[in-house]
Image (tube, coloured by chain):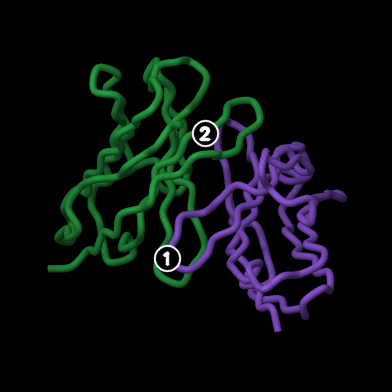
Chain colours: A green, B purple
């Protein structure tokens, strides 16, 4: 079955750009049946949807993060990526990638998550 | 786009039923039948347990059920079991290709 795995630096300095990659295995990222989302969760808090991308490169972002977020996709590597610029301590969180069902808008397969801390 | 409102915590005894509310607005929960619910045990990733407001994925116990009235969606867990102790998150489509989560609810099984 489809599995997702996040990867990237666990520590980012303030004002820099956070970059994470999600590798999809067990299925093709450009099968055309799904979007691919990023979600984050600060310690002890709720989930926050960051944005999603389709295999064509079409994206949708959380309006509150839109100015700082870029999500991209590399179908040749079966990966999609998150860039979050100008980070602060408030961006410290566990970051998850997930498979996102279009039209019905639910996330049915999740990665295990990766912790990113923003600190100098 | 504001987060959906969930109670911070709920509790119940084994065998009882509990309901977790998820209140949004006419721009999200009230406008679309696309509310999903996720169960998250400590240290684990969220797991989808309800989608389209009332549908259960294959393998999810029928003790979990969802409903909606106006701008509020609800998750009901019947016949509470110790293994149900977890955090529960609601999520709604909010238009324009965007989604919004609630703040999460911690369920304690007494």
- Give the residue at x 46% y 72%: A44
Labels 2 and 1 within one chain: no
Badge nearest the viewer, 2 or 1:
1
- Give the residue at x 83% y 49%: B68
Which residue is nearer to you in this view: B64 or A48? B64
Looking at the image, is B17 positioned above or below residue B34? below
The residue tagged 2 is: A100
Assess disc 2: are there few (<14), some (14-19) or many (≥20) residues with their C-alpha within 10 Å of its C-alpha. many
Assess disc 1: are there few (<14), some (14-19) or many (≥20) residues with their C-alpha within 10 Å of its C-alpha. few
> Mark 1 — on which chain does it sit?
B
Give the percent coordinates (x, y) of residue A32: 48, 15
Looking at the image, is B55 positioned above or below residue A91? above
Which residue is nearer to you in this view: A65 or B36? B36
Spatial separation of the CA atoms under disc 2 and disc 1: 22 Å
Q: Is residue B87 left or right of residue B68?
A: left
Q: Quadrant of residue B2?
A: bottom right
Q: Are marks 2 and 1 in contact (CB under 8 Å)?
A: no
Give the percent coordinates (x, y) of residue A100: 52, 33
Give the percent coordinates (x, y) of residue B25: 73, 50
Q: Is residue B99 left or right of residue A51?
A: right
The quadrant of the rendering that contains the C terminus of chain B is: bottom right
Q: Quadrant of residue A108?
A: top right
- The label shown at residue A111 is none
Q: SS for tag 2?
A: strand
Looking at the image, is B69 positioned above or below residue A105? below
- Give the residue at x 84% y 73%: B16
Looking at the image, is A72 positioned above or below residue A51? above
Q: Is residue B63 left or right of residue B83?
A: right
The residue tagged 1 is: B43
Which residue is nearer to you in this view: B48 or A102? B48
């Amino acid at each position: 079955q489809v599995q997702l795995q996040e990867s990237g630096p666990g520590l980012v300095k303030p004002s820099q750009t956070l970059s994470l990659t999600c590798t999809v295995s067990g299925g093709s990222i450009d099968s055309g049946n799904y979007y691919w989302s990023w979600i984050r969760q600060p310690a002890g808090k709720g989930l926050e949807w960051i944005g999603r991308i389709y295999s064509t490169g079409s994206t949708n972002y959380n309006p509150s993060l839109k100015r700082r977020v870029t999500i991209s996709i590399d179908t040749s590597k079966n990966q999609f990526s998150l860039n979050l610029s100008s980070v602060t301590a408030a961006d410290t969180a566990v970051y998850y990638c997930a498979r996102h069902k279009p039209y019905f808008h639910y996330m049915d397969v999740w990665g295990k998550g990766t912790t990113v801390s923003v600190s100098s | 786009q504001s987060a959906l409102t969930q109670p911070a915590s709920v509790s119940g005894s084994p065998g009882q039923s509990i309901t977790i509310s998820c209140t949004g607005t006419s721009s999200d929960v009230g406008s679309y039948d696309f509310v999903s619910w996720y169960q998250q045990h400590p240290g684990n990733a969220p797991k989808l347990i309800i989608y389209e407001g009332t549908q259960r994925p294959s393998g999810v116990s029928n003790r979990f059920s969802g409903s909606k009235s106006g701008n509020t969606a609800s998750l009901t867990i019947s016949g509470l079991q110790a293994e149900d102790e977890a955090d529960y998150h609601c999520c709604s489509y909010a238009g324009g290709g965007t989604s919004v989560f609630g703040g999460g609810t911690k369920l304690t099984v007494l």
